Structure formats: C-alpha cells, structure tokens
C-alpha cells in the first residue's frame, strides 16, 4: 500500500505551487485560482490522515466537505467583488485597488 | 524492495493521479492566459477527485467533482469571460516578482518536506490495507452529518446553511449595478 507520506508530499507540493501563484499572479481571478489550489492541498491532507489514522471515523472527511462548501461561498463572493472592481476601474489587476493606501 | 513489487495497480494509479495533479497545478499557475489556467485547474481538481476515489471515499469524490469541477470552475470561467478581454495576455508580471515568489515557495516547500522526513514518525501508522474493507456507506455519512451526539455535526451543518444564505445575499448586493450613480 502507499505510505501516508506520499500523500503528504503531494499535498505539500500542491500547496506551495498555490503559494507561488498567489504571490506571482497579478490578475485577481488568477489569485483566486491559486487559493483554490491551496485549499485543495489542505483537503488532501485531511482526507489522507482520516483514511490512514482513523479509518472508522469521519472527522477529516466531514471537515473537508465543509472546506469545499466554504470555498464555494468564498469564490462566489470574491467573484462578485472582482466584477464590481472591474466595473469601477476598467481592469482587474491587483494594483487597481489602492483607495486605502493614502 | 524489488521494482516489480512496486508496480502494482494501486501504486501506478497513485503515481499517475499525483502527476496529473501536480502538472495541472504547475501549468495553471505558470500559464499566461487565464482561460488555459482554468482548464489546467480543472485537471487538478479531477485528479484530486480521483485520489479520493482511490481512497474509497466515493461521496467526497462526487462532491469534489460536482462542487469544484462543476460549480466553482464554471464561476471562474464566467468571471474570465465577463471581466477579461479574451486573447489579451494580462500577465505582464515582472520577472523580479516571479523570482521572489519562486524563491519563497521553493524554500517553504523544502522546509516542510525536510521537517516531514526528519521529524515525521509514520512507522506506527497503520498500513491501510483495509481500504476496501472499511468502506464508508452513505448511512454513516448521513448520521454523522446530521446527528447531535458526540462526533456528529448538526450544528456546523446548520451554520453552513446560514453562511450560504448570507453569501448569496452578499454576492447579489455586491454585484448589483447601482443605477442612481449614473
């Protein structure tokens, strides 16, 4: 069988790929996609630990279900905000929001 | 261990799935066009659903496919089509920023992996040969999600419902066009 470390390695790599995108992307939709990658990496960890350590219980399973639901809610609100920004500014890059800077 | 022993169907499926996940994530982060990034994100999400199926968590795989690959990705594509001018490469990120991001994420990954392999003690972790035996049936999931006892999750479930309602109303209010401004 596959040891649990392999799942952890996959999820670590995916998490830091998401971190890279979060820092390097300029477009707000791209930043949001990187956040989805990070959330999915965390989900893999929850599910793998639940499967290997407590196969009779469902804690990590339910937790990752809730993570999926909250990610969906967050994406809907964030896309509404991005569309509002686009309507006001004309573009959707990270640098276009700086009202609070001064 | 012999290399032939490692070539079981389980291991091959796991390696293929993790390659799909990592390649999809990497391409989704690195590609210039946002529509392509959405497609690569789809590959990653489907690979993760396959990983859940591989662990015998059918309901979670179905939820992942329907909510992530079906719902959230559709939202992304809508947002790209509505907001973004197609065919225009919006990414003109400076190489300096990309370099710093690569250094930060690479060092973070090295740190976490080193911690995992130096301090991680998985020797007494049960080798989950019992994947097929301990199948999670829907009845157990339902009673866990909607029960009020110990290790049962009715209250978070209801709180999630309130969160979704608030999120629907909030998204409508935020995305609403304000006509009186014009």
Image (tube, coloured by chain):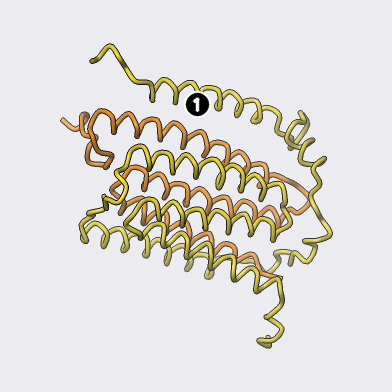
The N terminus of chain A, quarter of image: bottom right
- Residue B70 lies, in percent from the top left, at 57, 44
B32 sits to left or right of B78: left
Q: Is residue B115 above or below residue B172?
A: below
For residue B85, which quarter of the picture? top left
B39 sits to left or right of B158: left
For residue A77, which quarter of the picture? top left
Residue at 53% x, 62% y is: B21
Q: Is residue B169 above or below residue A40?
A: above
Depth order, front residue of B7/B108? B7
Depth order, front residue of A90/B170? A90
- Residue B111 lies, in percent from the top left, at 42, 64
Residue at 47% x, 47% y is: A36
B92 sits to left or right of B54: left
Residue at 70% x, 71% y is: B10
- Residue A53 lies, in percent from the top left, at 71, 57
For residue A97, which quarter of the picture? top left
Task: For chain B, give the colour.
Answer: yellow
The chain under label 1 reads: B
The C terminus of chain A, quarter of image: top left
Residue at 43% x, 47% y is: A35
Total marks drawn?
A: 1
B2 sits to left or right of B38: right
Depth order, front residue of B33/B62? B33
Depth order, front residue of B94/B37? B37
Q: Secondary structure at mark 1?
A: helix
- Residue B39 lies, in percent from the top left, at 46, 54
Chain coloured orange here: A
Quickly name the residue at label 1: B167
């Amino acid at each position: 069988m596959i040891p649990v470390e392999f799942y952890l390695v996959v999820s670590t790599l995916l998490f830091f790929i998401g971190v890279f995108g979060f820092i390097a992307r300029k477009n707000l939709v791209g930043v949001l996609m990187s956040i989805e990658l990070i959330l999915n990496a965390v989900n893999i960890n929850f599910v793998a630990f639940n499967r290997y350590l407590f196969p009779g219980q469902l804690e990590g399973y339910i937790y990752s279900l809730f993570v999926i639901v909250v990610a969906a809610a967050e994406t809907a609100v964030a896309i509404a905000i991005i569309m509002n920004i686009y309507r006001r500014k004309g573009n959707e890059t990270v640098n276009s929001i700086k009202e609070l800077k001064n | 261990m012999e290399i032939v022993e490692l070539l079981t169907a389980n291991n091959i499926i796991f390696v293929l799935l993790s390659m799909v996940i990592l390649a999809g994530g990497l391409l989704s982060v690195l590609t210039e066009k946002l529509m392509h990034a959405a497609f690569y994100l789809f590959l990653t999400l489907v690979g993760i659903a396959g990983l859940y199926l591989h662990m015998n968590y059918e309901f979670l795989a179905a939820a992942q496919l329907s909510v992530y690959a079906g719902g959230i990705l559709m939202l992304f594509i809508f947002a790209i089509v509505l907001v973004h001018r197609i065919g225009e490469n919006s990414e003109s990120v400076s190489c300096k920023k990309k370099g710093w991001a690569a250094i930060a994420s690479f060092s973070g990954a090295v740190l976490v992996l080193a911690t995992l392999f130096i301090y991680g003690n998985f020797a007494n972790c049960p080798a989950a040969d019992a994947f097929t035996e301990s199948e999670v049936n829907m009845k157990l999931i339902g009673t866990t999600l909607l029960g009020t006892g110990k290790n049962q999750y009715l209250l978070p479930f209801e709180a999630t419902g309130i969160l979704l309602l608030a999120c629907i109303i909030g998204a409508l209010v935020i995305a609403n066009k304000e006509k009186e401004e014009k």
